Image (cartoon, rainbow, N blue to C red):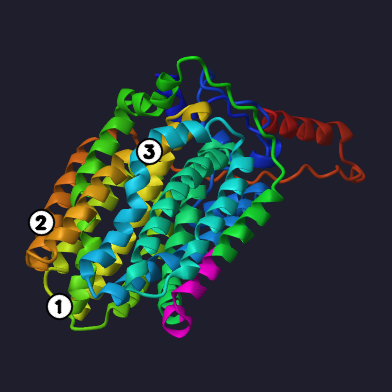
Amino acid sequence: MDGAAGVGRTGEGVSCRKEDRGTCDRPTTASGPPTPPRERAQCGAPPSAGGAMRHVLRRPEFRLLFCGLLASMSAESILLLALAIWVKDLTGSDGMAGATIFAVIAPMTLAPLVGWFVDRYPRRSFFVVANLVTAVLLTPLFCVRERDDVWIVYAVAALYGLSYLALSAALSGLIRQLVPIELLAEANGVLQTVRQGLRLIGPLAGAGLYAAIGGPALAGVGVLGFVTAAAVVGMLRTREESPARPGPRWPAEVSAGLRHLAGEPALRRALFGYALGSLVMGFTESLIFAYVDQGLRRDAAFVGVLVTVQGVGGLVGGLCSPGAVRRLGEVGTLATGVAFFGPAALALAYPDLRLGVAAVLLAGVSIPLTMVGLNTLIQRRTPPRLLGRVTAASEAVVSGPQAFSIGVGALLVGAVDYRLLFLLTGLVTLLAGGYLWRSRHLTPPTEPPHRTARIPSPRRPSAPAPGSSPTGDHDVIGATRRRRGR
């Protein structure tokens, strides 16, 4: 479908440029012969996960994008948990606090329309404007003062969810445009490492700022972060391809992302397995408040401490995710991430702080493995012209069940023992991970990169010693050059 099978392993019209791949100056296309491992190493294949991440950060375009995303992700990590804590303080309800996350995810039902809209505009320009619009959407939070204003928090959360969907779709296409296809896992791993690493300071900073200056001031932090991201990414200078004009049958174009997901076997099975796990993963958005309140007997703000601990696991998972993609394939990495969530949820059924810390760490490792595996699979198996629609549609396929489970979890947490719900979550995610693991053959691991021996530069021949044969020396030099030329 749309050449997705060819894109999956070799890329679609990806050229091997000298500045990207060192010594390789031959183009690599889907129809060309496979590049030998030795030549792939010379084309910039990273020798290790850490080296690969450094390699992708050396690219000026990606480094600038990374700096812009760092600003917006910092604001996001500080703000989102604080919104839920804010609602908890205003209402005293665990369910209403968890419903804040539901409000963010609910707009995912509009994903096909949002993806079609994103694909109609150049990636960089759309990304800049969307960040500015997101900053404006946060300004109504300045008016929230009491319980009757909670609807404003929910409205802003829903609008933010819509902008997040658009930003994710545009970002996926922008990364695919800036980074060679063999470095996509590393680029996604860098971003997930930072996103999860920000959990080390973001939630605690958000909870502390909320306690010190209140929710409206935190909205100002969010506005500043998204404006900074727009300004930095606006300095990016990259060739903007003109998107295809919408055809007369626009409903078919809107649904093109869903059709691509259904027609590509690896994407279809990956999203089905992940959606199965998402049916119960959303329970934890409300269950974590009940775990802290009823199980650990602590304030709601202690959730920020657990999310920070989760960030430690996320940092480890982000660093390991590129290597996991190379060794397990994209679907295998996704399966590992989903399966790791199972024992973490089972451990949280018993309210013990030491066990809870270990469980939250494991849940943190699972998140970047899941996201890097899925995002890299989508970018490699989707033609660039469809990437916005496919990314948005995949968000809807996963987030739809997750939004449903968040809503159900917010209702059940007041009627059912939270420990039983954690047990259910653990069992279902283990089943989903097992299903995905059986489908890992659809994206086989890539060959580990090989280091190439460094060949010394030929030295200028010295003057022949007295009594030696000049001809013999030239014969040796000529033979050496012939061997190197092979």
Q: Main secondary structure of the magenta part?
A: helix
Give me the residue at 51% from left, 22% from top.
Answer: 30
213 in magenta: yes
Corner quadrant of residue 408: bottom left
Q: Which residue is mark 2?
A: 424
- Seen from the viewer's position, the closer of residues 359 and 286 is 286
Mark with earlier residue (1, 3): 3
The residue most toward the top is 248
Give me the residue at 62% from left, 42% from top.
Answer: 124
Q: Which residue is mark 1?
A: 294
| Kind of residue at badge 3 | Leu
| Kind of residue at badge 1 | Gln
| Kind of residue at badge 2 | Leu
What is the secondary structure assignment of the residue under circle 1?
helix
Position of the N terminus, as image quadrant, is top left
What is the spatial separation of the Cα atoms under label 2 and label 3, in whole angstroms? 29 Å
One can see residue 387 in this view: no
One can see residue 114 in this view: yes
The residue most toward the front is 148
Q: Are marks 1 and 2 in contact (CB under 8 Å)?
A: no
What is the secondary structure assignment of the residue under circle 2?
helix
Q: Nearer the viewer, mark 2 or mark 3?
A: 3
Q: Is 277 positioned to the left or the right of 169 in the image?
A: left
Vertical placement of residue 90 versus 3, above or below: below
Give me the residue at 44% from left, 19% from top.
Answer: 2
Q: Is 320 positioned to the left or the right of 346 in the image?
A: right
Q: Position of residue 39 (x, y in %)?
A: 57, 34
Mark with earlier residue (2, 3): 3
